[in-house]
């Protein structure tokens, strides 16, 4: 019997990030949460910027979430997949992260979002913390 498929919600981002070990939450000047491990951000809710805007109206997106990724190849795979809700902008060229609009989070399952948050944390955690966490997990 398979588990019921559940799509991701914005609250899941917060719950998953806080569920990782050694996480601290900082807040940006506009109150946007920034999740960190060992003083390094791994996920944050971005304030509206001119580089992420509706192509038709020019309105800045107010719901962009930034996730670190393990490598540039991971980033390319995520943003080049036409079925993926992840994207990037020129501002993030050379930066190991992908963007996701909160309004598109339901395009991901909870399992997919869990993997993205865990990978973001792993990409920024110290090798010792990452190895300790991985040693206690049974990721599939």
Image (cartoon, rainbow, N blue to C red):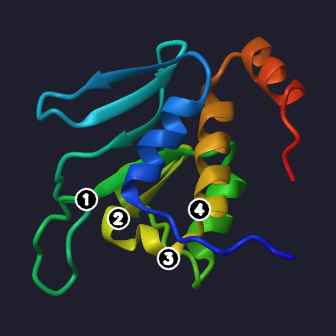
In this view, which residue lies farthest toward the front? Answer: 1
Q: CA distance from mark 1 to mark 2?
A: 5 Å
The residue that mark 3 highlights is 107
List the residue tagged with mark 1: 63
- Relative side of 46 to 120, left or right: left
Q: Residues within 10 Å of mark 1 (few under 14, many from 20)?
A: some
Q: Provide the secondary structure element on which disc 1 rests.
A: loop
Q: Residues within 10 Å of mark 3 (few under 14, many from 20)?
A: some
Can you give x and y, in whole percent of width and height, for residue 18 in the image? 49, 31
Q: Residue at x 67, y 43 (%)?
A: 119
- Element at label 4: helix
Location of the N terminus (image quadrant): bottom right
Q: Going 78% across and 24% down the picture, which residue do you hit?
A: 133
Q: Secondary structure at mark 2?
A: strand
Q: Which residue is mark 2?
A: 101
Labels 1 and 2 touching (C-beta < 8 A): yes
CA–CA distance in space, label 4 to label 1: 19 Å
* Residue topped by disc 4: 110
State left or right for residue 133 relative to residue 65. right
Tell me the mark number nearer the camera, choosing from 2 and 3. Answer: 3
């Amino acid at each position: 019997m398979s588990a019921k498929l559940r799509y991701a919600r914005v609250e899941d981002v917060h719950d998953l990030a806080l569920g990782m070990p050694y996480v601290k939450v900082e807040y940006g000047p506009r109150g946007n949460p920034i999740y960190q491990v060992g003083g390094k951000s791994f996920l944050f809710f971005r304030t509206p910027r001119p580089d992420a805007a509706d192509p038709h109206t020019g309105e800045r997106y107010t719901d962009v979430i930034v996730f670190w990724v393990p490598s540039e190849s991971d980033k390319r795979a995520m943003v080049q997949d036409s079925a993926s809700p992840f994207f990037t902008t020129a501002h993030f060229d050379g930066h190991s992260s992908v963007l996701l609009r909160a309004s598109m989070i339901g395009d991901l399952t909870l399992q997919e979002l869990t993997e993205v948050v865990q990978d973001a944390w792993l990409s920024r955690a110290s090798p010792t913390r990452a190895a300790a966490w991985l040693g206690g997990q049974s990721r599939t």
